[in-house]
Every structure is written in C-alpha cells, then in structure tokens.
Image (spheres, rainbow, N blue to C red):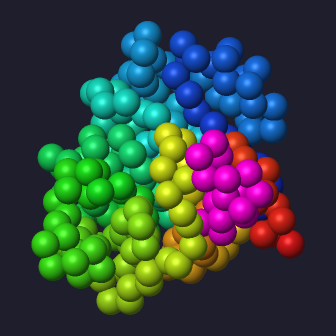
Amino acid sequence: AMGALRSGAGLVYLGVPDCIYEIEAVKLTEPVVLPLPDNGKTLSEAAVPEILELLPRMDAVLIGCGLGQSRGSYAAVKAVLENFNGPVVLDADGINVLSAHRDILRDRTNPTILTPHPVEFQRIGGATDDGRATGTAKLARELGCIVLLKGHDTVISDGKVTYINPTGNPGMAVGGSGDVLAGIIVSLLGQGISLMEAAACGAWLHGAAGDICAAEIGQYGMLPTDMLQVLPRLMK
C-alpha cells in the first residue's frame, strides 16, 4: 500500500481480514483500510461480495501480498480476475492459489501482470531450463499474461517483448521488498501507464530505490521501508 502511495497513487484502498483491521488502521494512516470478512486468520468466502462491490471504484487492483492460501483466498483471487475489467497485478499467494487453476488466467480477457519469485514461478508452471528470459517469455505466452520474474536481473516479458532490469542489489532480498515492487506497479497502472511499461518502470524504480539505500546505508541492514523513503526522489 505504501509502495503505491510513494510512487504517485492518489488514493489507495487496502482490504484486510477483519481480525487484523485495527492493527493495520493504526499502522497505516494514508491508505483507506477496509475490514473484510475472515475465518479468524485469512479472508473467508464471505469477503467476495464486498470485494465485488468495491471493484468498480478501482483503476487497478493488486491481490496476493500476505494473502495466505485458503478457500477464501482462492475465492477472492478468482472473483477479482473474473470480474474486474481493468489491470490486475497478481503477487505472492495470489499466484500460489492459482497453481492448480491456470485456466482462470488463460481465460481472462483483461490485462494481468504476475510478479513471482523463482519458487512461485515454478509453482505456476514456469521453468528456466533454457534461461530465465526464455522461460519467462514462454510462461507469459502460455498464460496470456505479462510475467515479471524477480531476482538478479529481473525479467519482464509479455511473450513477445522481453526486458531485463539492470537496477537492484542483494540487499533487497528481504521479506516485504517484493510487496513494495507490486505496489509500485499497481500505482503506475492506476496512473494510466501501459502494462509492459508499468512493469518495466516499476522494476527499475524498485531497484534504483534499493541502490540508493545500499549506497547510503549499506546492503546488510537496509529494509523495504528504507526504499519507501527514497522512492519520491525518483518520482520527481
């Protein structure tokens, strides 16, 4: 949520399980935090009607970060992909819950960006036996999505055009860093930037923010929140 705001989004809605709503509402003052029905831990299937009611207000949607893998999580992801008419960024558990339901991605007529790390990439059917760039392009063609494979030399492909991102460093291999990246991408999509450009620009901005942090405080102790602080310097 903060990655989206720090990269220029005007209004960010953050839907969370009701059991953690109070924590998130205190921690985050700028996003609009919305409680959704849960089963005491993760989203429940009862959250779907509320999510569908919210979708028409959105310019772009990100789902998956910290979502968990449950029947409710799958129902929420499925509902977003089948009912939202704009671009969707699918990250983390949003990818994992579809590992046995790839047809939902192939059947989607609206644009989708997947942002897997290498393990999630394999779970959704990707392989890098012939190289990361080739494997990313192949999966993008199979699923009809843009795929951004995170890691050293992040690869972005729509199956026809492939970019390799030059920014970033090992200090960014910290939990939460990928969530910042997903937030940046959905923010750029919401501002009207096209899919491939949003994915490629998001990867560059994310890596460049990490490089600034590495230069100023070192790689060993840098955190995703440090990257949030420097993002506005890159958005001038």
Q: In this rendered view, identify the residue nearer to me: 156 or 233.
A: 233
Above or below — where is 176 with respect to 23?
Answer: below
Above or below — where is 46 with respect to 61?
Answer: above
Q: In this rendered view, identify the residue nearer to me: 3 or 62.
A: 3
Residue 220 is covered by the magenta coloring: yes
Boundaries of the magenta span: 207-223
Q: Residue at x 67, y 58 (%)?
A: 214
Q: Quadrant of the N terminus?
A: top right
Task: Let me know if residue 131 appears in the view.
Answer: yes
Q: Residue at x 54, y 13 (%)?
A: 19
Q: In this rendered view, identify the residue nearer to me: 84 or 21.
A: 21
Residue 149 is covered by the magenta coloring: no
Task: Let me know if residue 188 appears in the view.
Answer: no
Left or right: where 142 falls relative to 225: left
Q: Residue at x 83, y 65 (%)?
A: 233
Q: In this rendered view, identify the residue nearer to me: 75 or 113.
A: 113
Q: x and y percent of residue 62 in the render?
A: 52, 50
Above or below — where is 147 with respect to 117?
Answer: below
Q: Quadrant of the rendered structure where residue 108 is?
A: bottom left
Above or below — where is 110 with respect to 221?
Answer: below
Left or right: where 90 falls relative to 190: left
Q: Quadrant of the C terminus?
A: bottom right
Q: Residue at x 36, y 80 (%)?
A: 158
Q: Main secondary structure of the magenta part?
A: helix
Q: x and y percent of residue 81 in the render?
A: 38, 53
How many labels, in total?
Answer: 0
